[in-house]
Image (tube, rainbow, N blue to C red):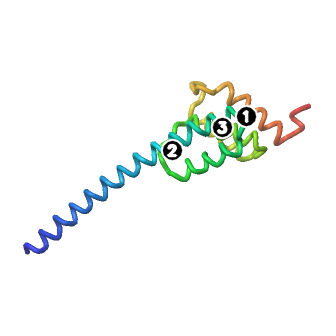
Amino acid sequence: MHFYKLAFILFLLCLISLTETKAQLNKADTAQAKAYYEQAQKLINQKKFVQAEVLFIKIFKMNTLLPDEICYHYSKTLFELEKYPQSKTFIEKYIRLQGENGQFYLNALQLQLDIDKKLDPTLNQ
């Protein structure tokens, strides 16, 4: 009987240790994702869209909690890379998440219009 109690206690200690380790890894991933995001924004300002896209892909693979604004910035990057369908997906997501209260709402509406014009050239007439 004591063996089972000891085994259970060891199991709980291992579980607690794993939980703490996972929390530390998540914190590190979040910090790394934030650093990548800040760098991606700088690259966008420098018009280095290919490099920014690489960082966005790394961020999304990290599976961390991200600010909604990342959808706007990623959409802008994809637009500049002429990846219009993907850009449309992310700008729609930003608008859906932030609505009229979003920091980039008016810019997002303009970007959405620009994307639609690229996807349907008849809208330019």
* 30 left or right of 37 in image: left
Question: Disc 1 designates what residue?
Answer: 112
**Amino acid beneath label 3:** Leu
Quarter placement of the N terminus: bottom left
Q: Distance between the residues labelled 1 and 3?
A: 21 Å
User: Residue 3 lies in what quarter of the image?
Assistant: bottom left
Where 27 falls versus 76 (above or below)?
A: below
Judged by depth in the image, the label closer to the viewer, 1 or 3, is 3
SS assignment at label 1 = helix
**Please, what is the three-letter code of the amino acid marked with disc 1?**
Gln
Q: Where is mark 2, residue-wise?
A: 33
Type of residue at label 2? Ala
Q: Is residue 66 above or below residue 22?
A: above
Mark number displayed over residue 43: 3
Q: Which of 70 and 106 is in front in this view?
A: 70
Disc 2 and disc 3 in contact, CB within 8 angstroms: no
- In the picture, the disc for residue 101 is none
> How many other residues sit within 10 Å of disc 3, few (<14), some (14-19) or many (≥20)?
some
Could you say where residue 81 lies in the image, as x and y percent from the top left? 76, 44
The reply to whether the C-beta atoms of the residues labelled 2 and 1 are less than 8 Å apart is: no
Identity of the residue drawn at 52% across and 37% down: 67
